[in-house]
Image (cartoon, coloured by chain):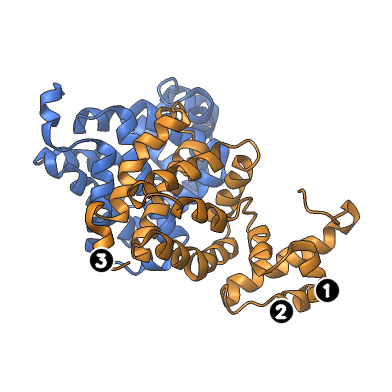
Chain colours: A blue, B orange
Amino acid sequence: MARAGRRPGQRSTSDDVLAAARALFAERGYRATTVRAIAAAAGVTPAMIHHFFGGKRQVFLAAIQMPIDPAAILDSVSDGPREESAQRLVRAFVSSWSSEVTGPALRTMIRSAVADEEHAAALRAFAEAVLLPRASAALGVPAVRVAAAMSILVGQAVARSVLGIGPLAALSDDELVALYTPPVQAALGPRAPQSQRGS
Amino acid sequence: MARAGRRPGQRSTSDDVLAAARALFAERGYRATTVRAIAAAAGVTPAMIHHFFGGKRQVFLAAIQMPIDPAAILDSVSDGPREESAQRLVRAFVSSWSSEVTGPALRTMIRSAVADEEHAAALRAFAEAVLLPRASAALGVPAVRVAAAMSILVGQAVARSVLGIGPLAALSDDELVALYTPPVQAALGPRAPQSQRGS
């Protein structure tokens, strides 16, 4: 929204780019999709895509309507004592969903990914190629445990913010963080001797 | 499907009943919706509804396309040592989603509940009026903790079976149960001295 140089009249070109990106990411996966291929499919130049969006990851995030950059969140999560990383992860996730800016967009994104197979395939490709490996390295736990932790947070968001289940919707952010940190910690694995595992 | 007395030619009446039920459950909530009101809205007699579906809960489950009766699952979960109830809950949930009979229907149900506000409202009403109070009593933990445990399992299903996130999709049912039991246990609360709390 705050990005410069994007006027209302250019919207349909931008939509073409995002539709082409969504289709290619879903079909070929995240890694095999290039900005050049997206540009060719959308009938624009790669330079235009770089101008409008930045790089491939930004095109991807816009294509799946993701209003936040998970990489930035991961950086903040891995920055601090490891025994509190579960709590930082839960807090960062809860804050994004509670925000009046990013919350509604995240609801739209999850609704769309659950309803639309192409959207789901793009999100899956990004999670497997970028998000899980990066989070796994940052947190020092296997990708499958990171995936389990993320799924818990997605379930929380679906139950609370999409379905609106009463007892969860009534909780404050702090109460939510307190309730979900132990399960996320349990999904990430045994807390104490993690650094002995050579990660 | 095995229910007697339902012939193809009667399908549109049944659909009318389910549409009326969905609208009323969403608008009035689960408790305030009667079989009589559903019958009136659908232009049939209450006796026809009882004949086709059974009681109110069965109409509800059909209306939200829920292929299993959570009450039956809860009975099996609460039947056994309480310290293993988290594991039984996870196993019952994972089995329903892995089944070739109920799995696809559960995927359809969750997709529909996430995409459609009326469907979500009906599911929410049922969860708050029936499912959470009953599960809370059966497991001896507060409703908010049951809701958190359920949300973890829904997140697992969304990540694995709807989005198809690789590391989770690759797991066997037993591996899934092993991975998700500790988080669900953590959501349900401290394991050891639960029986001292007078539940």
**Label 1 is placed on what type of residue?**
Val
- Residue B197's tag is 3
Q: Is residue A193 visible?
A: yes
| Residue A67 appearing in the image | no
**Could you tell which of marks 1 and 3 lies nearer the N-terminus?**
1
Residue B117 x/y as whole percent: 56, 63
Crowdedness near tag 3: few (<14), some (14–19) or many (≥20) residues, C-alpha within 10 Å: few
Task: Please name the amino acid that badge 2 sits on.
Answer: Ala
B2 or B155: nearer the viewer? B2
Instruction: Kindly identify the amino acid type of the residue bearing the numbered disc 3.
Output: Arg
Judge whether A157 appears above or below A137 on screen.
Answer: below
Q: Is residue A54 above or below residue A31?
A: below
Q: Measuring 44% from the left and 54% from the top, which residue is drawn there?
A: B78
Q: Secondary structure at mark 3?
A: helix
Q: Residue furthest right?
A: B9
Q: Which residue is mark 2?
A: B37
